Image (cartoon, coloured by chain):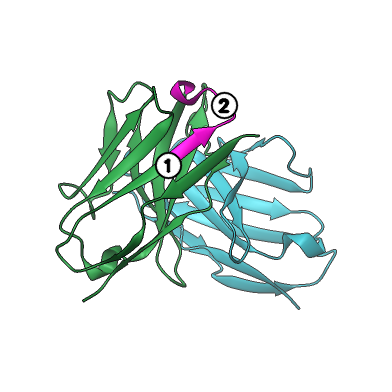
Chain colours: A green, B cyan
Amino acid sequence: EVQLLESGGGLVQPGGSLRLSCAASGFIFNTYTMNWVRQAPGQGLEWVSFISGNGGDTYYADTVKGRFTISRDNSKNTLYLQMNSLRAEDTALYYCAGGSGYYYEALDIWGQGTMVTVSS
Amino acid sequence: AIQMTQFPSSLSASVGDRVTITCRASQGIGNDLGWYQQKPGRAPKLLIYATSILHSGVPSRFSGSGSGTDFTLTISSLQPEDFATYYCLQDYNYPWTFGQGTKVEIK
């Protein structure tokens, strides 16, 4: 079964750090480009970051650039998001999502999300 | 960043109705647009990519069209399981951007 399972969310104080993980199974992970997408409570979807299959290319939303770092370990079939200098507005459910092939932008695999709450 | 304006933000419709949702990009994005469906408490699901290509397993009542700046998602005959929130996503360039979403409710 194709599956993405996020973990690492929790409550953190403003200015703090957190590392999210996304464990992949049931497919060839290194053939998939991966993304993080977040959703603040009651709000819409926001794309956060992208990483290519070999990890060589990364992109970020302006709202997180310089604070968040996306990475992957293909030997462990795992995607990461290192989040530093967290702000209240980073509070959201964070999804990992991926796509492959010519239309890698089509995000056809999604996890169930991990909740990050930034509050004092 | 490219802004995606999606409308309406919500609509009420009956089973069997034809429903159209629009996304407008702040600049041309070719055909680099996808549509996603999200139900409460669930992760989004891919419906359509590259403007008009139906993802595997998605019912044929869903269709997409457009190019450049204006795009539409059409549900030809609304079914009970289609009541959800729909989002467009431009993947023309980074940062990718979603529309604000359209909540489709039961009339």
Q: Is residue B18 visible?
A: no
Circle on res. A22: 1
Total numbered labels: 2
- The percent position of residue B101, horizontal first and vertical second, equals 52, 63
Type of amino acid at the residue the image marks with label 2:
Phe
The kind of secondary structure element at disc 2 is loop
Q: Residue A108 appears at what percent x and percent y?
A: 57, 38
In the rendered image, residue B59, in percent from the top left (x then y), is placed at 78, 44
Which of the numbered marks, if any, corresponds to residue B5? none
- What is the number of the mark on residue A27? 2
- Occupied quadrant, residue A11: bottom left
Identify the subunit bearing mark 1. A
Q: Residues within 10 Å of mark 1 (few under 14, many from 20)?
A: many
* Label 1: element kind: strand
The C terminus of chain B lies in which quarter of the figure? bottom right
Q: Give the crowd class for mark 2: few <14, some 14-19, many >=20 residues within 10 Å.
A: few
Q: Are marks 2 and 1 in contact (CB under 8 Å)?
A: no
Q: B34 or A28: which is nearer to us?
A: A28
On whether disc 2 and disc 1 are found on a single subunit, the reply is yes
Does residue B34 appear left or right of residue A90 in this picture?
right
Q: Is residue B61 visible to the viewer in this orientation of the structure? A: yes
Position of A37 with respect to B44 (left or right) is left
Asked whether residue A25 is drawn in magenta, I would say: yes
Tell me the magenta residue range. Answer: A22-31
Q: Residue at coordinates 71% horizontally, 65% vertically from top-left?
A: B83
Q: Is residue A45 above or below residue A89?
A: above
